[in-house]
């Protein structure tokens, strides 16, 4: 059961909306001929401005998840006994499928591969301990805005309801990939997921983002250009930071890339100590300090 709370901030937002509507109606009434039928809402555009910075950030369109997707995500988030590492298996598998698709398309039209780094059929995995993010990039076919909306939230997929039915009959969450909805396993380890994607079928690059509530947003990506492909950025939960460790990731990549035909590069950061020789002038300075 969901409970809606009206805070002072929400109250201000609703008052602002009410004042906007009243002013618009007053203007429509004043300008209408006396004998004309009065349509209070003719030509009126009602806008809702929020004081919430997180809403401003999206600056895009908000969508509701399809009902079965909501159920699926609830199952995943509340699964206490699943192997959380399966999320990486599913992301690698999806990336491989996208690369296979663009390679197949290139057999009849080599131009789809593009040039430079864009033409490289590969995957990259980047662990950032400071930001607590894990990023997977593939140079596959990518997704258009419509693809992101349809494939990741609003259009019912047969696999979604099939998985829910199987789970209710005792199936394990770890089998999610068999139903074609493995992407959502990312919420086993992540609080926030951002999918940046560029398709050859769309002139613009887009971002799909959700925090695993009942909504997601889609907006134009003004950041780093992908050329073609998809970049998935996971902001990890505090109890899942093990998936930023180099050795842990190496082991998982080795395990889950056994049947993958594309290279996967792991990027990590290391701290190394290096001895720096002391110059003569520095030694004299240190001796002087010791004498004092």
Image: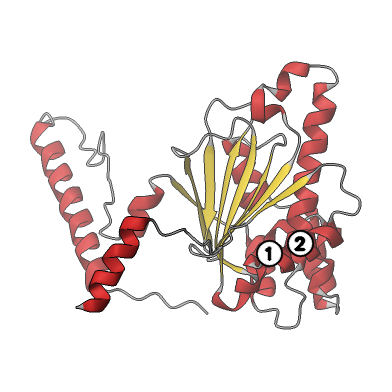
The residue singled out by tag 1 in the image is 246
Determine whether 93 is above or below 119 in the image: below
Q: Quadrant of the C terminus?
A: bottom left
| Nearer-the-camera pick, 57 or 33 | 57
The residue singled out by tag 2 in the image is 250
Q: Please indicate whether residue 233 sits to the left or right of residue 87 in the image.
A: left
Residue at image position (71%, 57%) is 183
Residue at image position (26%, 33%) is 43
Determine whether 244 is above or below 29 in the image: below
Q: How far apart are the alpha carbons under marks 2 and 1?
A: 6 Å
Residue 279 pos. (x, y %): 38, 56
Badge 1, how many Cα within 10 Å: few under 14, some, many 20+? some
What is the quadrant of residue 284 in the picture? bottom left
Name of the residue lying farthest toward the bottom: 80
- Residue 161 visible in the shown view: no
Residue 36 pos. (x, y %): 17, 30
Residue contact between numbered discs 2 and 1, judged by CB atoms under 8 Å: yes
Helix, strand, or loop for circle 2? helix
Q: Please indicate whether residue 148 sits to the left or right of residue 99 in the image.
A: left
Badge 2, how many Cα within 10 Å: few under 14, some, many 20+? few
Q: Please indicate whether residue 161 sits to the left or right of residue 71 in the image.
A: right
Residue 235 pos. (x, y %): 54, 63
- Residue 171 visible in the shown view: yes
Q: Please indicate whether residue 267 sits to the left or right of residue 50 in the image.
A: right
| Nearer-the-camera pick, 25 or 84 | 84
Residue 24 pos. (x, y %): 17, 43
Type of colouring: secondary structure
């Amino acid at each position: 059961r969901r409970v809606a709370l009206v805070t002072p901030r929400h109250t201000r937002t609703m008052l602002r909306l009410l004042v906007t509507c009243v002013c618009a109606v007053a203007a429509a009434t004043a300008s209408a001929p006396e004998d004309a039928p009065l349509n209070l809402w003719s030509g009126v555009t009602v806008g809702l401005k929020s004081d919430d910075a997180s809403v401003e950030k999206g600056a895009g369109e908000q969508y509701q998840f399809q009902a079965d997707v909501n159920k699926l995500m609830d199952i995943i988030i509340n699964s206490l006994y699943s192997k959380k590492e399966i999320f990486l298996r599913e992301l690698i598998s999806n990336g491989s499928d996208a690369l296979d698709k663009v390679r197949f398309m290139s057999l009849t039209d080599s131009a789809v591969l593009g040039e430079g780094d864009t033409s490289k059929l590969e995957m990259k995995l980047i662990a950032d301990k400071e930001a607590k993010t894990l990023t997977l990039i593939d140079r596959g076919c990518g997704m258009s805005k419509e693809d992101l909306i349809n494939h990741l939230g609003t259009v019912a997929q047969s696999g979604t309801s099939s998985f829910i039915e199987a789970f209710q009959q005792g199936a394990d969450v770890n089998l999610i990939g068999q139903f074609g909805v493995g992407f959502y396993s990312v919420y086993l380890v992540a609080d926030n997921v951002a999918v940046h994607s560029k398709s050859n079928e769309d002139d613009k690059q887009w971002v799909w983002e959700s925090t695993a509530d009942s909504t997601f947003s889609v907006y134009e990506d003004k950041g780093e250009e992908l050329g073609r492909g998809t970049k998935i950025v996971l902001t990890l939960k505090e109890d899942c930071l093990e998936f930023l460790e180099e050795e842990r990731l190496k082991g998982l990549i080795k395990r889950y890339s056994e049947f993958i035909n594309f290279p996967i590069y792991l990027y990590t950061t290391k701290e190394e100590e290096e001895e720096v020789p002391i110059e003569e002038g520095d030694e004299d300075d240190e001796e002087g300090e010791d004498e004092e």
